[in-house]
Amino acid sequence: MALELISSSKCFEGEQRIYSHNSTVLGCEMKFSVFVPPCMLEEKKECPVLYYLSGLTCTHENFIHKSGMQQHAAKEGILIVNPDTSPRNVNIPGEDDSYDFGSGAGFYVNATQEPWSKNYLMYSYVTEELVELVNKNFAVVPNKKGIFGHSMGGHGALICALKNPGQYQSVSAFAPICNPTECPWGQKAFKGYLGDDKEQWKQYDATHLAQTYSGTPLELFIDQGSDDNFLKQKQLLPDNLLAACAANDHLQAIYKQREGYDHSYYYIATFVGEHIAYHAKFLKN
């Protein structure tokens, strides 16, 4: 599981790096980005780690170029890791035909349907292989992990936390797809990756997982712009997740609606510092 350093740039006294490796889980070369905070570089300190999952059409680079997160991660002393959103160049017919399925749209599930089931195992990649890589190659505190994401990646962050009680000490999401079994994006992806059995779909739906969650008490920080077109188009459905959390004593939801903000990285850049500070409360205690 050797890593190859693709690039490294000094940023807020830390380093923004991009790595590649051959993924055993996904059966292809994968790239991911890592912001190494100055305390890890200069003081050789062990640091907590925060994983960020990106949305549809994104790669491992959108977040590091557009969010401005590095200054906040440097201040808090947190390593931030963000993977790509799907396997790449695995030569599946149709993998590049649409923006919301295939390349750039792995939906953080383990596909069970051919031909996707050989490579499209993003859930296992994010929760197992990538974590193992980071733990082996960086001076992280293994039991201090948080996860957050945007849109499809917000969905990914929520399901990773809900399906693995205790593995992540904090979770937050920007404009997440909260109930994918009930929205067009989710229905298209789940049918393609998981088939027709809707009981299988529920295993990757944050709202259904929240209804049955019985693990370690968990707080979900949900962030949503009021002028988000995808909210208006019923792709995100945060109210369904909030209702499920309200009915479960093991879960608590914080919901912040940001007046006038849309679905873009301008919105993320405005509030990413608040999210990183939120995670730091859990990861640095």
Image (cartoon, rainbow, N blue to C red):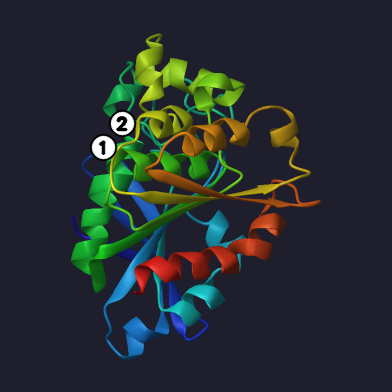
Residue tagged 1: 27
Quarter of the image containing the N terminus? bottom left
Q: Residue at x 51, y 44 (%)?
A: 154
Residue tagged 2: 119
Q: Residue at x 64, y 29 (%)?
A: 235
User: Left or right: 69 with respect to 157?
Assistant: right
Give the x, y percent position of residue 230: 70, 34
Question: SS at mark 2?
Answer: loop
Give the x, y percent position of residue 203: 35, 26
Give the x, y percent position of residue 131: 26, 55
Residue found at the far right of this picture: 260
On residue 52, the disc is none
Q: Identify whether 245 is placed above or below 66.
A: above
Please give the count of numbered marks on the rendered protein: 2
Q: In this view of the protein, which residue sits in the foreground, 265 or 216?
A: 216
What separation in Å lies between label 1 and label 2 (alpha carbons)? 6 Å
Residue 85 is at least partly visible in this image: no
**CB under 8 Å between discs 1 and 2:** yes
Q: Identify whether 260 is placed above or below 28.
A: below
Give the x, y percent position of residue 18: 41, 64
